[in-house]
């Protein structure tokens, strides 16, 4: 019989998987907050049965609400300030795509002004639509 008493090994908690899961959750929350902007501006995009389902990550979002007000990344902006911001962005990142989210009940002129401002800046315009019900 042995006089040496073997001690149990203390159980260690591995926190690396917990940290991995938390990082993924933080990224998910950050990305989902960006997509929530269209709802906070109370814009309902028009329906289209064809077109792309997603947008690339390197984009700017320009919104046009029902009254014809312009929004850049969720903040209200005038047309002149929008044009200047788009030109500044074109100088920094020439390949940026601009997603224009116009309310389906907005005047066409406001959406065309947004498209024109994007084209003048030399950026790539895209119109966001939704699937028909």
Image: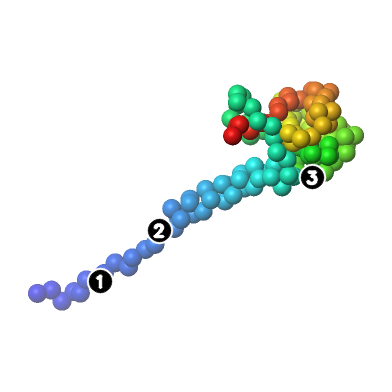
Q: Earlier in the sequence, mark 1 or mark 3?
A: 1
Q: From mark 3 to mark 2, how far is it between C-alphas? A: 43 Å
Kindly identify which residue carries mark 3.
75
Total number of numbered labels? 3
Residue furthest to the right in view is 80
Task: Judge the density around disc 3: few (<14), some (14-19), many (≥20) Cα neighbours within 10 Å.
Answer: few
Q: Which of 61 and 121 lies nearest the eye of the viewer?
A: 61
Q: Which of 130 and 61 lies nearest the eye of the viewer?
A: 130
Which of pointers 1 and 3 indicates the residue nearer the eye? Answer: 3
Q: From mark 2 to mark 1, how far is it between C-alphas? A: 21 Å
Task: Judge the density around disc 1: few (<14), some (14-19), many (≥20) Cα neighbours within 10 Å.
Answer: few
Is 91 drawn above or below residue 7 in the view shown? above
Q: Which mark is residue 14?
A: 2
Asked if the residue under mark 2 is in contact with the one under mark 3, i.e. CB atoms within 8 Å, the reply is no
Quadrant assignment, res 125 = top right
Residue occupying image coordinates x 73% and y 34%: 104
Q: Which of 20 and 73 lies nearest the eye of the viewer?
A: 73
Q: Quadrant of the C terminus?
A: top right
Q: In this image, 115 relative to 57: left or right?
A: right
Q: In this image, 69 relative to 95: left or right?
A: right
Task: Judge the density around disc 2: few (<14), some (14-19), many (≥20) Cα neighbours within 10 Å.
Answer: few
Measured as percent of width and height from the top left, residue 58 is found at 67, 33
Measured as percent of width and height from the top left, residue 12 is found at 37, 63
Kindly identify which residue carries mark 1.
7
SS under mark 1? loop
Is 133 drawn above or below residue 124 in the view shown? below
Q: Quadrant of the N terminus?
A: bottom left
Residue occupying image coordinates x 90% and y 34%: 80
């Amino acid at each position: 019989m042995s006089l040496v008493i073997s001690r149990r090994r203390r159980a260690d908690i591995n926190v690396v998987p917990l940290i991995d899961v938390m990082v993924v959750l933080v990224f998910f929350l950050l990305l989902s907050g960006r997509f929530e902007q269209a709802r906070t501006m109370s814009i309902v995009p028009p329906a289209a049965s064809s077109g792309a389902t997603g947008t690339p990550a390197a984009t700017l979002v320009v919104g046009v609400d029902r009254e014809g007000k312009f929004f850049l990344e969720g903040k209200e902006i005038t047309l002149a300030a929008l044009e200047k911001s788009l030109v500044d962005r074109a100088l920094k990142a020439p390949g940026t795509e601009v997603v224009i989210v116009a309310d389906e009940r907005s005047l066409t002129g406001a959406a065309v002004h947004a498209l024109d401002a994007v084209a003048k800046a030399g950026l790539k315009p895209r119109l966001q639509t939704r699937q028909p019900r």
